[in-house]
Amino acid sequence: MKKYKIKSEAVPFILEKHATKNYPLETWEGLGISLNALDEVKPPFISYGKEKGRYSDLCGWSKDDGSKFEFTINFPSAKMQEYENMKKESEMRKLMDAIQSLVDRFYSDFNFEE
């Protein structure tokens, strides 16, 4: 279900408690807020590669280091306060642990060690 947030220019005209909320359209309509005052919240996504200017590093292999794949985790709708909370080491550790378990399962399908 899509979620929406108040556009920056509309914030002064609504109750402060709704200024940072992401709700489904039905909730906003129930509050009497027009679609014209809302922006769609884009969900987080993973993209393949790490941007470097106009180019992306994707992957590589070397005899000494093995395989390397680059990914970027995007949070396009994150506000500054959300970013500040997410980037804390303890929160990044939780995310890394969750990703690591998926990578371990993925790799086990391709591990051909003798």
Image: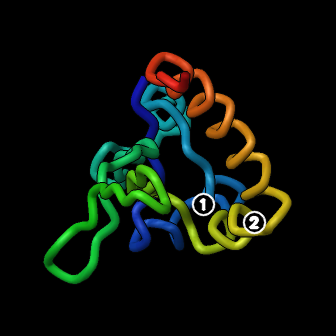
Q: Is residue 42 above or below residue 103?
A: below
Q: Residue at x 56, y 20 (%)?
A: 108
Furthest residue toward front: 114
Query: Considering only vertical position in the picture, is 102 above or below 11?
Result: above
Task: Say the numbered circle drawn on residue 59.
Answer: none
Q: Is residue 32 left or right of residue 9?
A: right
Residue found at the far top of this picture: 109
Is 78 left or right of 90, judged from the image as shown? left
Give 110 or 51, whichever is nearer the viewer.
110
- Three-letter residue code for mark 1: Ala
Q: Which quadrant holds residue 77?
A: bottom left
From the top left corner, tell me how far across and down residue 65 is, in percent: 49, 60
Which residue corresponds to mark 1?
Answer: 19
**Which quadrant of the figure has residue 31?**
top right
Residue depicted at 14% across the width and 78% down the height: 54
Of residue 72 and residue 37, the one placed in the foreground of this image is 72
Q: Amino acid at mark 2?
A: Asn
Residue behind mark 2: 85
Disc 1 to disc 2, how far (Cα)?
18 Å
Q: Residue at x 59, y 21 (%)?
A: 105
Mark 1 or mark 2: name the one nearer the start of the chain: 1
Q: Is 39 displayed left or right of 32 in the figure?
A: left
